[in-house]
Image (spheres, rainbow, N blue to C red):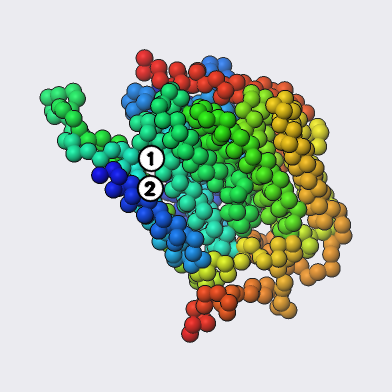
Amino acid sequence: MENVLAIVVGILVACATFLILSRDLIRILLGIAILSNAANLLIFTAGRVTRDAPPLVPGDLEVPAGAYANPLPQALILTAIVIGFGLLAFALVLSYRAYVAMRTVDVDAMREAEPPYPDQSPPTGEDGRQTPLRRRGAAGTPTREAAQ
Amino acid sequence: MNWLLVWPILIPVLTAALCLLAWNAPGLQRTLSFLGTFVLLIGDLYLFAGVWEGGVQSVQMGEWPAPYGITIVADTLSATLVVLTALIGLGVAVFALGDIGVERETTGFHPLFHALLTGVGGAFMTGDIFNLYVWFEVMVIASFGLMALGCERAQIDGGVKYVILNLIATTVLLVAIGLLYGVTGTLNMADLAQVVPQHAEQGRLIVIAALFLLAFGMKAAVFPLYFWLPASYHTPPAAVSAIFAALLTKVGVYAMIRTFTLIFTVGQAYTYSAILAVGVLTMLIGVLGAIAQNDVRRVLSFNLVSGIGFILIGLGLGTVLGLAGAIYYTVHHIVVMSGLFLVAGVAQRVAHAQGLDALGGLYRSQPLVAVLFFIVAMSLAGVPPLSGFWPKVILVQASLEAEAYIVAAAALVTGLLTLYSMSKIWSLAFWRAKPEVAPQAAPGILDPGPLGAGRKAVLLTPVALLAVLTLAIGLFAQPLLSISERAAVALMAPDAYITTVLDEEG
């Protein structure tokens, strides 16, 4: 059973890596979601898959009677799921804000913080505002405006 | 049970909670924030004094005995680092009074700031490797909030890269912890220190060690995993980027030092040479990146990456002297980097420009800002007698003793290039006359009004204190050197750490 689960974890990590290597922000987030699930499954597998009794202590005993399943991996996974869910929700909202602010989900076209010319200030127009950076809409993934 | 040990975690949590309750009262939040960091500093100093007098201290959460419950441990290294966390926290909390506008204060700046300090303090104090992951996540989620707070375009863009790469790093850390648990069956760091060297499957443990190196390396922003840092650290307000620069990468470095001296002593020849190579490349690439940049705080971000390399070579050398140099450098770097980011923020704000090509004439118009910048910048460059000089001497001496001549040469070249990059900022932004380009509205800074004399005093006081601190630890180097040496000796022979944690219940 551990071997099957290990292969499943491997496939999940491979899918996640493929998705994270994409330039599309949504695909990257999906990849991260799959990656965190792969990590949870890995902890589950690393804690050994057994068919023992639940780790409950009967009222009149000090220790559980007989063999019992390891409760620690579940506790770890529960923590990791909660944290991973919160972070993913935040990342989704941030990506939406990024789309609203920059009108693109192509991470190569997001050059606000890292201008393509790092050794000079961004050019400013006559009104004192910064001119919008060149988008890769034509060469790469079409932006929403280009599609409409 | 020593309650002082949970102080670095408890006080910021309480402050964050109280600030949350005072959501709509920015004035009250400011008072709470200042008081919180002040009380934190006092308690941490007591904690440090206790550790300095009485050695390693530990406490078991919930009174569960050692390898099963969560342990909080303070040795010299963690006690020193929590004191610095509180010190920088206090400085930045004061700076934030003048730097963070009401818009950000009423959308949760203060609660997030103290949540960040909680995560940092917890990561320094914990003795349980899964708990370390949890503190990393506390720290990271708070930093996500601080990074995005204000929602300027550059912030959102930098935030996307910061968030994604940090999410991947924490997932890798989780995978490494899961595998380590699967192989050894324990999560307590002191217990791991006993189990790992005697384990039968050393090959697997070295693979796991490499995964830890990858995860902590992404957190610490080492070559070639540092790209999220210069993409994002210059976008939030100066107070936020200063606290990030001072503490976040140092937590990654601390975790690396802790795990690779305490737990993964197996296969040291392999892991330490990897750390050494990464350290050399990090400091060289970092400083070369700094020279190419235009935005002042991006220059500093690359210098920050370069400094992480210095700390790593101290660890990678694997000697007491090297580690002492690394710890000394960490302390120096925390103080100087926060000072530099703060003073750069002030300079960018008074000049209404971010890029070196648009800045100028600040020495004439703002002499105090210029003098403060000069002190911290020369300290970073390692000009004697400032605080950057001594750890570089120690690290070069340690690499010569270990016959790692390439490392020594790389450290010296990096020092020279750091001096070049600092004097570039000095001569362009401060020394020359203001260039004849139209002043730009600085896009990364939500300007909360004009900079009056009172606000400027609030902004410059913490910078001045940090500058005095770097002068002090440069001129009176011996106390900090003794602390670093004692911490390094304890790291190389962690018997006291292990016995204190595991015998605590007896």
Q: Position of residue B52 (x, y in %)?
A: 58, 20
Q: Residue furthest top?
A: B506
Q: Residue at x 30, y 45 (%)?
A: A3
Q: Amino acid at mark 2?
A: Ala
What residue does disc 1 label? Answer: B178
Query: Within 10 angstroms of label 2, few (less than 14), some, or many (20 or more) residues?
Result: many
Dots 2, 1 in contact, CB < 8 A: yes
Q: Amino acid at mark 1?
A: Gly
Occupied quadrant, residue A69: top left
- Relative to B142, A113 lies left or right: right
Q: Position of residue B346 (x, y in %)?
A: 71, 53
Chain letter behind tag 1: B
* Secondary element at tag 2: helix
* Secondary element at tag 1: helix
Chain letter behind tag 2: A
Separation of marks 2 and 1 at Cα, in angstroms: 8 Å
